[in-house]
Amino acid sequence: MLDVLMFATLCVGILSGFPVVFILTGSALVFGALGWAFGVFTPSLLGALPQRVFGTMTSEVLVAIPLFVFMGIMLERSKIAEDLLETMGRLFGRLRGGLAISVTVVGALLAASTGIVGATVVTMGLMALPAMLRNRYDAGFACGTICAAGTLGQIIPPSTVMVILGEIISAAYQQAQLAKGLFSIQTVSVGELFAGSLLPGLLLVALYILYQAVTAWLRPAIAPALVQPEGAVSRGEILGALVPPIVLVVAVLGSILGGVATPTEAASVGAVGATLLAARRLAGAVWPASLSLASVLGLVVLASLFDLRLGRSAPPLADQAAIAAAALCSAGLAVAIGHALAVTARAGVLAGVCRSTATITAMIFAMLIGATLFALVFRGLGGDDMVHAALSAIPGGAAGAIAAVMAVIFALGFFLDFVEICIIVIPIVGPIILQMDVDPIWFGVLVAVNLQTSFLTPPFGFSLFYLRGVAPESVRTLDIYRGVAPFVAIQLVALAITASFPELATALPRALF
């Protein structure tokens, strides 16, 4: 029973509010010592811990986490997200329910360009919520719209949770293949999960907008049109607000899905691109972004036409000229990036972005290491066998087991953060589920869609906390809870659709990869 008590202790400890990383490591050490004392745990299993920690800290895929976090926080701190929200609100506001639809559209665009839930919810809470309340929107409907739109960053790629989940699903898939006696191991890449989550993410956006439009049509008092239009939106304003995030999305997501760059390389492009866009927004200088774009295009063209490898004994004259031109392009890119860094530093933005990025990244990696220790002790106490027996005993085979796992993840979402669920639950149940010939990409996307609900389910939904912190006192906490309930139901509908039609998650990865 030590494995059951260990998991129960973990859940109780997390509910106490103590830092999760210390609960993970502490419960693992305590129950490891108890298992050793009772003769049911071998301490030598912990010898694998240093190697696993080293593998986590040197994983090239996980380097994408701080880069994506940096990109999202930079866009939020430089007010690019605010410009986008204000413009889209003026564009759609004249329609009944138009402000709600504009918030959802902006949430989807910010999800594809930032992937940071907290930043998105806070930004839209500060900008959109007062405007919606001022225009007589129902408080619950407005709060639910903002919270739901802010969580889209976890399913629409690129997102931090998909990077973490991709690494965990890949490890679970390898363990499942080894358990089945297969030694020609296949893997699952983060790029495949990004591609698999794109259509379900867009489906969720469409369901949100459909609900908002129908609600505004049936109950006009809940979501009326703007009382006092704020003036027509010019084409220049629309392009100025839409083009920067769209260009960033195409550069990051397009390079991954097109096979041009790995997620880590694309994340670095996104971080640099966000810094250049922030400098353009803060200083009004267009030349750094233009120079960097021209330099990158020049490097791509030169690399495709000439052999730019250095150190060759006698390269042809044309290659020598191309190498010189490539060096010039690299210098131009360095000048543009240096100028952008200087502008953001002078504006006081860069230091705050770096500090927040370091804090979030340290939290994620500390929990990954703590979860590694927890998983080692849990397996050593026989937890894997217990979970395997429990899932195998569920009627319905693989479908029944998946339904049970989804129900557990949904229930845990009321109390745990998405990172905690990823690193605690998936390493335990993932290898067992994937041994049942379940498609790993489909399973990963189902988990990702399910994890969306953890941000909206009270009492510990993080989006609810974020919005409560910036909402005016006239908005009650009960209004926020009431407003998110329909969107939680919509997320469950999206989960059911994705489960019923696996091609939504598997068609695009198969076509691209």
Image (cartoon, rainbow, N blue to C red):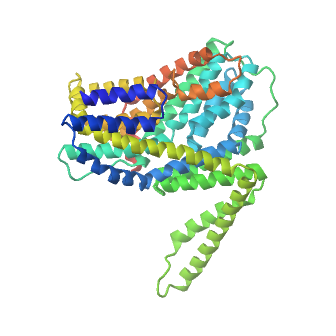
Residue sitting nearer the eye, 363 or 303: 363
Q: Residue at x 20, y 29 (%)?
A: 389
* Picture quadrant where residue 382 is located: top left
Residue 39: x %, y % from top left:
18, 37
| In this view, 244 is above or below 399 | below
Quadrant in the picture for the N terminus: top left
- Count the labels in the image: 0
Residue sitting nearer the eye, 191 or 34: 34
Q: Is residue 179 visible?
A: yes
Residue sitting nearer the eye, 182 or 302: 182
Q: Residue at x 78, y 39 (%)?
A: 234
Extreme bottom residue here? 314
Residue 309: x %, y % from top left:
49, 76
* Picture quadrant where residue 323 is located: bottom right
Q: Is residue 434 visible?
A: no
* Picture quadrant where residue 506 is located: top left
Residue 225: x %, y % from top left:
73, 20
Q: Residue at x 50, y 57 (%)?
A: 265
